[in-house]
Image: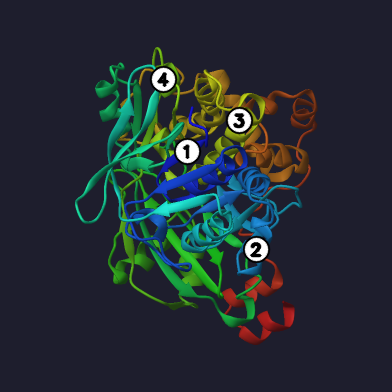
């Protein structure tokens, strides 16, 4: 190591900023390498094309972000983001029916991805140890199979330079080139699993009706897997400035249209037409935007033999999920928290990055299985995977899953347990706890719902009664 410890982070997105904030706690200097020009405010940028679509920051990830950058969630709320408690603040048609709106301790933070990235970036870059080199491309790594010692760069003028580092962290997202660089270091190729449902997204932003612009719930119409037809779903997400961000999605063969005229028709054709009913009462603020960057892909860097010191990979560069489940950002935050813990324990000692990779593999494992075992149920899904767990559930396993999912709709104890797992606040294994099994044996705590569980003010919007909505709010 050099006298002054230095880390280089590849990528200035959410993962890169959280990672940089962690590294600045433990090292003397951190340099972020970014291909784009980072916006000065909450604006979209070219390097994150999927940022236009709905993004959910689950409470497990939100709490991890606050542990890395204290006060971030509070700042997001101050900038107009919404804290929606689960399932109280969601009108939710699950594959098994309408969810009762129980109170709960888990939540999601909803806002535009541009606002989320900006607030996190502003928080991270307030640390003077962190500098950003923008419009700079990474050409490769320095060092060898035993130790990575830096990176080769090219700036916007075309000049190539070398930058030494004690630690290089690839946070470059789905576009990461790391797997191509491994042979240059004398390392084996990395194992890869891919589950591609072919899902596509279409998103449009609306101005919410004024009486409920600040208090409307998220509305989520989920697809129902296992029916032998493409899965189609939609979500209305309250974001900052009194807007609704509406994302429609469909798997291979059932993709949503990207033209303005057909957007509402697709929403009306979902398992319930309530999204279309609401959007007829809202004002569009721009055209429909589409995206197909949705493949579940996991690269098992933790299994590469003789992994070198000085090289770490985090975020979508390691495991990227179908965005419909909303787990990518939370996994990045939990991974950064794992890095913080390991650096606090061992610093830059040999074997540190290997230990972090093992911890991060555990962080991403539950959301990986939640996404892939759902996506394989849709026709046309393409699977290239060695993980034996990515397979249709057996009869007994499916019966338990159906029992649990159905009970969560009308039992607050089961619902709370399910929300903890969804929010990445508890492992999937917690669903086998004795108190949950006891709750499943009790039977229905509430009668099943037959219609969306809107409150009076929310129903007034559907009825076109602006005055009633304002009076009930």
Choose top left, top right, bottom left or bottom right for residue 204: bottom left
Q: Residue at the location (26% across, 29% down)? A: 180
In this rendering, which labeled residue sits more in front, label 2 or label 3? 3
State how far apart marks 2 and 4 are (Cα). 38 Å
Q: Residue at the location (53% across, 56% down)? A: 125
Which of marks 3 and 2 precedes in the sequence? 2
Whether residue 226 is visible: no
Disc 3 residue crowd, few under 14, some 14–19, many 20+, Cα 10 Å: many
Mark drawn on residue 343: 3
Whether residue 235 is visible: yes
Q: Residue at the location (45% across, 68% down)? A: 40
In this rendering, which labeled residue sits more in front, label 2 or label 4? 4
Which of marks 4 and 2 precedes in the sequence? 2
Which of marks 1 and 4 precedes in the sequence? 1
Say whether marks 3 and 1 touch (CB < 8 Å).
no
Q: Nearer the viewer, residue 291 or 41?
A: 41
How many labels sit on residues? 4
What is the x, y in percent for residue 375?
Answer: 41, 35
Which residue corresponds to mark 2? 75
Disc 4 residue crowd, few under 14, some 14–19, many 20+, Cα 10 Å: many
What is the x, y in percent for residue 201?
Answer: 36, 54
Say whether marks 4 and 1 touch (CB < 8 Å).
no
Which residue corresponds to mark 1? 7
What is the secondary structure assignment of the residue under circle 1? strand
What is the secondary structure assignment of the residue under circle 2? helix
Which of marks 4 and 3 precedes in the sequence? 4
Residue at the farthest top position: 305
Which of marks 1 and 2 precedes in the sequence? 1
Which of marks 1 and 3 precedes in the sequence? 1
Q: Is residue 106 left or right of residue 270?
A: right
What is the secondary structure assignment of the residue under circle 3? helix
Say whether marks 2 and 4 touch (CB < 8 Å).
no
């Amino acid at each position: 190591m050099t006298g002054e410890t230095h880390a280089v982070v590849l990528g200035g997105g959410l993962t890169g900023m959280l990672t940089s904030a962690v590294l600045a706690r433990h090292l003397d200097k951190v340099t972020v390498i970014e291909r784009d020009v980072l916006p000065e405010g909450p604006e979209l940028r070219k390097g994150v094309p999927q940022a236009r679509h709905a993004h959910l920051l689950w409470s497990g990830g939100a709490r991890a972000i606050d542990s890395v950058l204290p006060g971030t969630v509070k700042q997001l709320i101050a900038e107009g983001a919404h804290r929606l408690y689960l399932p109280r603040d969601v009108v939710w048609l699950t594959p098994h029916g309408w969810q009762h709106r129980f109170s709960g301790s888990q939540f999601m933070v909803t806002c535009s991805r541009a606002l989320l990235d900006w607030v996190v970036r502003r928080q991270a870059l307030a640390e003077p140890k962190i500098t950003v080199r923008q419009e700079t491309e990474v050409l490769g790594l320095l060092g060898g199979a035993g130790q990575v010692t830096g990176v080769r760069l090219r700036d916007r003028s075309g000049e190539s330079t070398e930058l030494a580092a004690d630690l290089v962290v690839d946070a470059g997202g789905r576009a990461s080139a790391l797997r191509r660089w491994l042979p240059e270091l004398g390392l084996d190729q990395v194992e890869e699993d891919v589950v591609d449902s072919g899902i596509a997204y279409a998103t449009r932003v609306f101005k919410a009706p004024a009486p409920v612009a600040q208090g409307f719930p998220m509305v989520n119409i989920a697809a129902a897997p296992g029916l032998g037809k493409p899965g189609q779903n939609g979500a209305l997400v309250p974001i900052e400035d009194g807007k609704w961000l509406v994302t429609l999605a469909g798997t291979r063969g059932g993709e949503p249209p990207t033209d303005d005229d057909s957007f509402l028709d697709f929403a009306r054709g979902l398992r319930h037409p309530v999204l279309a009913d609401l959007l007829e009462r809202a004002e569009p603020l721009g055209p429909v935007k589409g995206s197909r960057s949705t493949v579940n892909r996991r690269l098992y860097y933790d299994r590469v033999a003789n992994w070198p010191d000085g090289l770490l990979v985090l975020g979508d560069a390691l495991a990227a999920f179908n965005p419909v489940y909303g787990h990518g950002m939370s996994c990045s935050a939990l991974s950064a928290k794992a890095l913080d813990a390991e650096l606090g324990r061992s610093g830059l000692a040999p074997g540190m990055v290997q230990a972090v990779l093992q911890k991060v593999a555990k962080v991403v494992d539950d959301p990986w299985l939640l996404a892939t075992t759902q996506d394989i149920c849709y026709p046309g899904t393409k699977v290239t995977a060695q993980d034996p767990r990515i397979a249709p559930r057996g009869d007994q396993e499916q019966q338990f899953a159906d029992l649990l999912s159905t009970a969560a709709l009308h039992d607050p104890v089961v619902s709370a347990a399910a929300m903890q797992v969804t929010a990445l606040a508890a492992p999937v294994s917690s669903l086998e706890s004795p108190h949950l099994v006891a709750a499943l044996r009790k039977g229905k705590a509430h009668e099943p719902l037959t219609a969306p569980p809107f409150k009076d003010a929310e129903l007034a919007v559907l009825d076109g009664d602006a005055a009633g909505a304002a009076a009930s709010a």
